[in-house]
Image (tube, grey):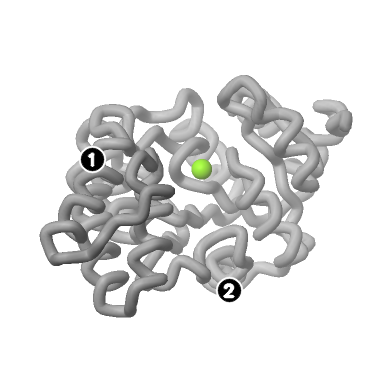
Amino acid sequence: MKAPPTAETALLLQRARFLLLDFDGPVCSIFAGTPASRVANDLLGALRTEGVSIPERIKATLDPFEVLRFAHSINFAAADRTERRLREAEVAAVPTAMRTPHAADLITAWRKTGKAVAIVSNNSEAAVVAFACLHRLTLDAVVGRTSSDPSLLKPNPHLVERAVDALGAAGPDTVLVGDSPSDIVAAKESCVNAIGYANKIGKYARLVDAGADGVVEDLGTLLDALR
Ligand SMILES: [Mg+2]
């Protein structure tokens, strides 16, 4: 599948009144200094210490969210404990997170035009707020994970709809920038336009296939569109 040309992506951004940014990818790489695989392993270790038998299929996972989904499949208490540990790991990872090139400038340029921007993330709200404070990012809203129920995370539209509400926005006036097919699906289900950020090889086609209205490989492209 072929994405619409960049000129159309630029127009999509210019016409929008509200901007939603996914966090891990478009704003930073949260686990740049603390590998996600280590966090996943630590979460599994904590469950094992509590007497939980870890199934073979999950023992080698590199994805902390897969551990959260597994914990939720055991019971609510295990999910709550795992979510809390994941939240603590995310907040602890903030000082070593790597900022995405042009992200801060994009947020500043967007707000300079008098328009509102929010971050909408499957990461904990606490980690997003900590990152924004550390890097002095001014945002109009932050919507992140506040529950241990993984089914409420993107691709479920729940978080995107919360962000749209928080900004007093309407779906068609809003554009989301995300680096995962789940971001694109959540946006489209919320009637929000979606621009994929293909920051790794192989992502471009997956973002288009998920329904992205446009895909960029560099946030500088979006920054240029605002200038
Ligand atoms: Mg992401």
Which kind of residue does numbered mark 1 sit on? Answer: Ala
Residue 69 horizontal/vertical position (percent): 42, 62
* Closest to the observer, 150 or 144: 150
Answer with the quarter of the image where residue 154 lies: bottom right
User: Is 129 on the left or on the right of 84, as rendered?
Assistant: right
Task: Provide the residue designation for mark 1.
Answer: 93
Looking at the picture, does residue 182 appear above or below residue 201? below
Q: Which residue is mark 2?
A: 165
Instruction: Give the image quarter of residue 53.
Output: bottom left
Residue type beneath disc 2: Asp
Instruction: Give the Cα distance between marks 1 and 2.
Output: 29 Å
Q: Is residue 173 above or below residue 35?
A: below
Tags 1 and 2 touching, CB below 8 Å: no
Residue lying at the far left of the rendered structure: 49
Disc 2 is placed on an element classified as helix
Cβ of mark 1 under 8 A from ligand 1? no
Residue 152 at x, y percent in the picture? 51, 70
Residue reaching furthest bottom?
Answer: 76
User: In percent of the image, x 46 and y 45: which residue is there?
Assistant: 23
Residue 173 percent coordinates (x, y): 75, 60
- Of the numbered discs in the image, which one, if any, rests on residue 104? none
- The percent position of residue 153, horizontal first and vertical second, equals 51, 63
CB of mark 2 near ligand 1 (< 8 Å): no
Q: Is residue 23 found left or right of 205 in the rendered image? A: left
Please name which of the two marks, 1 or 2, marks the residue nearer to the observer.
Answer: 1
Mark count: 2
Q: Residues within 10 Å of mark 1 (few under 14, many from 20)?
A: many
Residue at position x 42%, y 53% in the image: 66
Q: Is residue 49 left or right of residue 145?
A: left
Mark 1 vs 2, N-terminal side: 1
Query: What secondary structure is found at the residue carrying circle 1?
Result: helix
